[in-house]
Image (tube, rainbow, N blue to C red):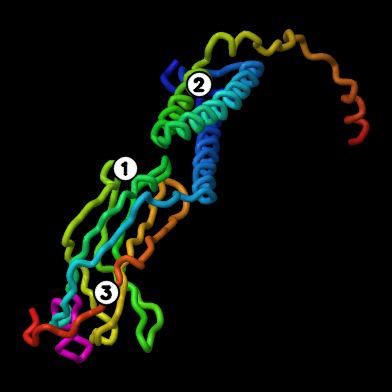
Amino acid sequence: MHNLSQRANTALSLASTVLFSMLGLVAAISFFTGYGSPSSANVQVKNIKVVQSRYGPDYFDYGRKTSEFGVIKFDLDADLSDLFNWNTKQLFVSVVAEYETKTHNKNQVVIWDKIIRNKESAKISLRNVPNKYALIDFSQKWRKQQAKLSLHWDVTPWVGTFQMGSSNASTAVFTFPLVENQSGR
Amino acid sequence: MNLAQYFEWNIDFEGQRMTDLCLNVILPLSAIVAFIYGYIQQSLVASLAIFGGGILLSLLVVLPPWPMYNSNPVKWLPVEKPIESPYKGEQTKAE
């Protein structure tokens, strides 16, 4: 420590160690206490119909030219501001359709998502939201399938591990109707 | 004396001990204050800002050669004329 560069080296290396210990403590606290749950998270199905169409922008159809797509509109009311603490960087919120078929007992399709970056925009109240992503089954047919919508959230921290949660899906149960037109989009 | 020679900023041993003590007190203490303030205000940015201020304060205290770090210079012994080595005779004997 007898000259400037040695003192600068010691000072900055000690500062890095102390900084990373402090951030490690923040991450550890978030790991054990979690982020809690939102005060309200509600999805309601407004409208559901099934249309036939070709699949994919360059028609990669898995050999079949008529795939059944669910076209759904839902209402979303959620107050996710309780999930924002000092270690929350952003929330990734998605609406997921879950259902069970004879061949596969757990299916989940993400039909809508959004990134929320601050506490002020964490109160969402949306009406008649169309699905962003294709609601299509692996078998390409819906066959009066029963499904339910739920809200999922993933918390991205500043330091630490990701954590996720989801809402109760019992309020948004719906059944796919039969195909409404043969001509498709 | 050129720029590199000027920025040696040497300090004596007692000063080095003092700077070591200052670093080991200022940095952990500012981290503790930063953590507590940030936790209460629920703002990680506030924590990092306070700790950044603590780093700057520690650099200001430790890097420049303040007079207190040079107030115990090493006491070198006075220069004496060389004395006859008692082993000289033995060396010639071994040859």
Q: Which residue is mark 2?
A: B63
| Image quadrant in which you'd find residue B23 | top right
Q: Residue at x 73, y 8 (%)?
A: B78
Which range is magenta?
A57-70
From the viewer's perspective, is the residue at label 1 or at label 2 nearer?
1
The single residue placed furthest to the front in the displayed view is: A171
- What SS does tag 1 mark? loop
Please identify the quadrant where the N terminus of chain A is shown: top right
- What SS does tag 2 mark? loop
Please identify the quadrant where the C terminus of chain A is shown: bottom left
Please state the chain letter of the residue tagged with numbered disc 2 in the rendered image: B
Q: Which residue is mark 3?
A: A174
- What SS does tag 3 mark? strand
From the viewer's perspective, is the residue at label 2 or at label 3 nearer?
3
**Foreground residue among A61 and A124:** A124
Among the two numbered marks 1 and 3 on one chain, the one whose residue lies closer to the N terminus: 1
Do the residues under discs 2 and 3 have CB atoms within 8 angstroms? no
As drawn, is A51 to the left or to the right of A78? left
Q: Residue at x 52, y 15 (%)?
A: B65
Measure the C-alpha gap from mark 2 to mark 3: 69 Å
Please state the chain letter of the residue tagged with numbered disc 3 in the rendered image: A
Q: Which residue type does callout 3 highlight? A: Phe
From the viewer's perspective, is the residue at label 1 or at label 3 nearer?
3
Measure the C-alpha gap from mark 1 to mark 2: 41 Å
Q: Which residue is mark 1?
A: A119
Do the residues under discs 1 and 2 have CB atoms within 8 angstroms? no
Q: Residue at x 51, y 41 (%)?
A: A20
Q: Which residue type does callout 1 highlight? A: Lys
Q: Position of residue A56 (x, y in %)?
A: 17, 78
Tell me the number on the disc at residue A93: none
Q: Residue at x 38, y 63 (%)?
A: A168
Answer yes or no: is residue A97 visible: no
